[in-house]
Image (cartoon, rainbow, N blue to C red):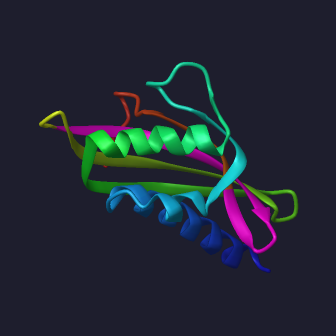
Amino acid sequence: MDLNTITRDILKTINAVNRSYTDGWHEEEFRRYIHPDIVAVFPDSPGRIEGKEAYVAEWRDFCSTAVVIRRQETAHRVSIFSGGKASVVTYLFSVTFVMDGREQTMLGRDMFFLVREGRKWLVAAQQFSAEPEDVVSI
């Protein structure tokens, strides 16, 4: 498989993960793309989130209290490792949502680590943070 095809497949996975919580909460779809041993670090959660159940619970909690109005992503970068079996994806994002009756917009950056299991890419790690103020965002 060539690098363009691998990159396209990786970005399809990231898009599917993001759609499964931005277009309403579609837990079964979301779970399809998550590695059982995922690790995540989020700015509003202490320590690290470990395992698929804990990770899914974080997103379920967010989706139970927030309604995503729009999400945009730019500046996608895909790095491929281990002969096409691992990847790091980074990008900038803007997400607007309503929580507790208030509309909020978060500008940030996302980093995913994915592993290929068979023909499928799975998210094995995620970290997101607010975009530094001196960077021009979307």
Residue occupying the point 58% across, 37% down = 54
Q: Horizontally, is 130 left or right of 81 in the view?
A: left
Q: Is-magenta flag for residue 109? A: yes
Q: Nearer the viewer, residue 11 or 133?
A: 11
Q: Nearer the viewer, residue 107 or 62?
A: 62
Q: Horizontally, is 130 left or right of 29 in the view?
A: left
Q: Residue furthest left?
A: 101
Residue occupying the point 34% across, 27% down = 133
Q: Nearer the viewer, residue 137 or 120?
A: 120
Of the 4 image quadrants, the one containing the N terminus is: bottom right
Q: Is residue 62 above or below residue 132?
A: below
The answer to whether residue 21 shows anywhere in this view is: yes
Range of residues picked out in magenta:
103-122
Secondary structure predominantly adopted by residues drawn in magenta: strand
Q: How many marks?
A: 0
- Residue 23 percent across, percent down from the top left: 32, 62
Q: In the rendered image, which quarter is residue 20 located in?
A: bottom left
- Residue 102 percent across, percent down from the top left: 13, 35
Residue occupying the point 33% across, 39% down = 107
Q: Residue furthest top?
A: 46
The answer to whether residue 126 shows anywhere in this view is: no
Residue occupying the point 45% across, 58% down = 18
Q: Horizontally, is 6 left or right of 46 in the view?
A: right
- Residue 40 percent across, percent down from the top left: 61, 36
Q: Residue furthest right?
A: 83
Q: Is residue 23 above or below residue 36?
A: below
- Residue 48 percent across, percent down from the top left: 62, 26
Q: In the rendered image, which quarter is residue 126 located in?
A: top right
Q: Is-magenta flag for residue 107? A: yes
